[in-house]
Image (tube, grey):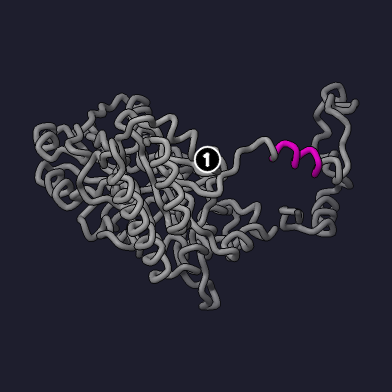
Amino acid sequence: MGHYLPSTPEERRAMLESIGLSSPRELFADVPDSVYLNRPLNLPEGKSELEVAAYLTALAEQNKSYKTILRGAGAYDHYIPSIVKYIPAKEEFLTAYTPYQAEISQGILQSIFEYQTMICELMGMEVSNASVYDGATAAAEGVAMCRSRKRSVTLVSQAAHPDVIATIRTYCYGVGAEMKLIPVKEGRTDEEALKSLLNEEVSAIYFAQPNFYGQIEDAEALIGLAHEAGAMAVMGMNPLAAAVLKSPGECGADVAVGEGQPLGMPLAYGGPYLGFMATTKKNMRSLPGRIVGETTDTRGNRAFVLSLQAREQHIRREKASSNICSNEALCALTAGLYMSVMGPAGMKEAAEQSMAKARYLAGELAKLPGVEILYKGEFFHEFVTCMPKQEAVLNKLEEAGILGGLPIQEGLLWCVTEKPSKAQLDQVIDLVKEVLA
């Protein structure tokens, strides 16, 4: 790992000499000697590289690795081109963080700018920030953008991911705002129930596309109902699904948010991921975090700057829309690389393959005795089945190195990406058939 400090030892020595010092320790001359640590830390002795490698390998062998993954629910096993893994691992980027000294961080700023541009194109929006911690945070920040003194009630679809619902509820609780759930009907957000909940106190609605059950919502209808009542609409979007479905911008959403993990990030035991956020120019100054912009320097050359930073450290606290002050720069770089390498055609193909394979698995499972596809509406690449002997089915699949659907209250939530082959899906069907027989 290279040293992240931008100055060389010679430059640091010159800086010390210019203020009459010979070492950094002299900067702390007023600190009493009694508080300095003058003994070794109580840590085990260091190990050699060989010993560390052996120890970590033994730890890794305790993990369960699956050759076929048919589980999603917010974290998806997509194919990641090798270059997408290689470039962010370079030491120039591995410590990447939103720069405070923007003028010496042009490369990092440009990578964020390109990421923002691609997110805007994918979401059909005009402005994107430099990302937040994860998709649930993005959703909670998105509805917070829409809140005002007169309108403080947030309506959230019960068909959204449970973790997203919980995060939005926590954010609302923290500021004394109210959150209400929109009931589900046949696996999708109940439009009639939404109509009855909308009033002059509602600031925004939130729903996911596709939703937690994999169902494709009638986004334009939901957004239209919100706008008729004077409320804003925050649309959570699977970024890969945006390659084949209408974008939030095309549907009329005010804010588009989502989990960026499908854009080139491995499952990685739950993180790190990134939350993307995009909106219209009208709402730009309410967007939390940072926005990198393009400009020209004094010589007329292309340059990048931190254009907007709507947080309490930079503007009056009472006007700050959020206390988000960080971003997932390395993950944003990864997402930008993935979108660049795959291109519109590659992302569309990955999405179409995921849809086709999910429909194949659902159709074949539905032919087995006792198996039912719970929701009949159109779905992206996830679906819910009701079947007998669920636990036995999952155990049988695990024995074969297959991670089956996620057990939820309604049944099993299955997910198919572009990775599994037809032979692998046929193996799953045979194993399920064997257990049910």
Which quadrant of the view contains residue 189?
top left
Magenta-colored segment: predominant secondary structure? helix
Quadrant (top left/top right/bottom left/bottom right) for the C terminus: top left
Residue 311 appears in the picture as rendered: no
- The percent position of residue 387, horizontal first and vertical second, equals 32, 34
Element under disc 1: helix
Task: Name which residue lies at 36% across and 39% down.
Answer: 413
Name the residue furthest front.
437
Name the residue furthest bottom.
300
The residue closer to the viewer here, 309 or 316, is 309
Count of numbered badges drawn on the protein = 1
Residue 53, compared with residue 295, is above or below; it is above
Query: Is 57 included in the stretch rendered in magenta?
Result: yes
- The percent position of residue 152, horizontal first and vertical second, equals 23, 32
The residue closer to the viewer here, 63 or 269, is 63
The residue closer to the viewer here, 65 or 312, is 65
Residue 37, compared with residue 71, is above or below; it is above
Range shown magenta: 53-60
- The percent position of residue 203, horizontal first and vertical second, equals 21, 38
Query: Label 1, on which residue?
Result: 270
Residue 187 appears in the picture as rendered: yes
Task: Name which residue lies at 44% across and 47% down.
Answer: 428
Task: Say whether residue 361 is left or right of residue 57.
Answer: left
Task: Name which residue lies at 59% across and 63% down.
Answer: 82
Quadrant (top left/top right/bottom left/bottom right) for the N terminus: bottom right
Task: Say whether residue 319 is left or right of residue 106.
Answer: left
| Residue count near mark 1 (Cα–Cα under 10 Å), binned few <14, some 14–19, many ≥20 | few
Query: Is 394 included in the stretch rendered in magenta?
Result: no
- The percent position of residue 175, horizontal first and vertical second, equals 34, 27
The residue closer to the viewer here, 169 or 147, is 169
Task: Say whether residue 426 is left or right of residue 382.
Answer: right
**Residue type, label 1:** Gly
